[in-house]
Image (cartoon, rainbow, N blue to C red):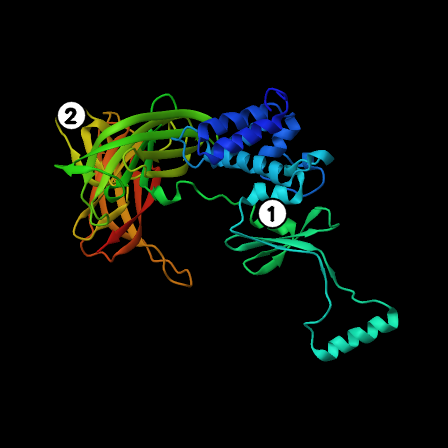
Amino acid sequence: MLRSRPEDPLPYFTVGLSYHLERDYERAYQAYNKGLHRMSTDEQRFMLAVFTDHSADPKLTIPDMQTLQRFWAGKNPLFLSPVNERMLEQCRRVAYANVRYGEQEKGIDGWSTDRGQAYIRFGDPLGLQSRPAEVDTHLDDPMFRQRWHNFDANLFGTFSDRYEFGKELWRYENLVLVFDNTDTRDAWKFRIAALDGAIIGLEDLVERVPERFVDPFGDRRFEISYQWAQFRDTGGKSRIELYYAIPANKVETQTAKGLGTVDFEKGLFVFNSVWDTLDVKRLPVKQLAWIKDRQFRDGYLLASEVLRLAPGKYNLAGEILDRKTEHVGGFRSRIPVRSFSKSELEISSILLARRVMEKPDRPFGRGRYVILPNPVRETERNRKAYFYFEVYNLASDDFGRTNYSVTYQTKPIATDPLGNEDEWITAVTSEVAGDHPWEPVYLALDVTNAQPGLRDFRVIIEDKLSGQTASESTQYRIRW
């Protein structure tokens, strides 16, 4: 078939579907791509798009290929895998729709039909019910209504005014789609949908449920707690410190003396705001720090990354794949990287930590502090909460000395149903004299008597020489 029709895209989709059914995903992906590249530009855009409009002319609303490539990058469920499973599933649906709903002798492609488009959008129904066309004979009606219909038929010469088209009902988790066979020759048209029991039309359906996709890693996937903080760096960039906690009970590891032996593949993927790939870091990992924590049954493994980024908006994805169990963990985050001023008083992000230790024998700067981060952002009542941050652009006197005050405030997050907020409580205020225009600062806050729950934490810096003030805040949780 491929040899006789080498430029026809449909055989490649059929071959890809065969590979897909055999779970040979890489070959399926290759076959689908060959089929896509043999289509016209408009056909490619239509095939790959998640349909946003049900008009007869889809070209009016289909985005360009670059936009679609970005779209599919953002939908990729696992960047560590060799293929984009979401895009692969979309191609499989297109191939199946062409085989199942197309009529080649009439020149009708399956993906252009109502049922084909619904299949591409929502995938395999959990249940499918077919009903043949029928005429309502009213035999199930009460006797008085049967007599009325019989009188009506004798008077007007009609047997019934209720002809029902053949129907297909596609059932999903909370959605039912109904199609009518409008001319008894497989001319199936979308009729109506029911979402959570409410009847809606196609336009509302597309807006409220644009797509359905079942995560192929769902039963093997787990969430990772993470924390990131940004600090001023050289060349107008920011230093992003990223820390995340991998639950030890979700992976296979041997732990002893603060270390966990693992067999991971770890990846960090950096994209701009529209999902263009900027950087990829992939490496095998055999050992990570192991942290005991009551929140996790077997503690957690601590991983970290440092990025240097220019101001702007970014998408980050951190992933780990346990090669022994094939469990996958990850997180995704949008990070707005700020532009630090060269003259105005400013404070970096506040980094929560389990412990901060200063090493006086080390040179001045960030490297002088050993920080054990707190990616879960929680502190037990019998421990201290540590906060690290940096202050920039302090004014100096004629002797190169700085003078500023630091105020630490905290308050519970409002739980009042009326939205009333608690007042800030000042925990510590101190005055500091230094000899650098920027200062690394940390606080060990005693939370022994604090009530458990989510809390705000705020730092206020007042420069005594310039009169400028700056503040920065974060949130953390105190638990029993």
Residue closest to the eye, 395 or 51: 51
At 72% from the left edge and 65% from the top edge, which residue is drawn? 136
In the displayed structure, 41 sits above or below 133; it is above
The amino acid on which the numbered mark 1 sits, given as a three-letter code, is Val
Q: Residue 8: horizontal and vertical position, in percent?
A: 64, 24
Regarding residue 95, the answer to whether it shows in the image is: yes
Q: Residues within 10 Å of mark 1 (few under 14, many from 20)?
A: some
Report the residue marked by disc 1: 206
Going 29% across and 33% down the picture, which residue do you hit?
Answer: 323
Contact? badges 2 and 1 (CB < 8 Å): no
Q: Is residue 310 left or right of residue 119?
A: left
Tag 2: amino acid: Arg
Residue hosting label 2? 362
Please provide percent x and percent y for residue 358.
16, 33
Q: Quadrant of residue 316?
A: top left
Secondary structure at numbered mark 1: helix
Q: How far across and how far down the image is residue 95, in percent?
A: 57, 34
For the residues labelled 2 and 1, the Cα–Cα distance comes to: 60 Å
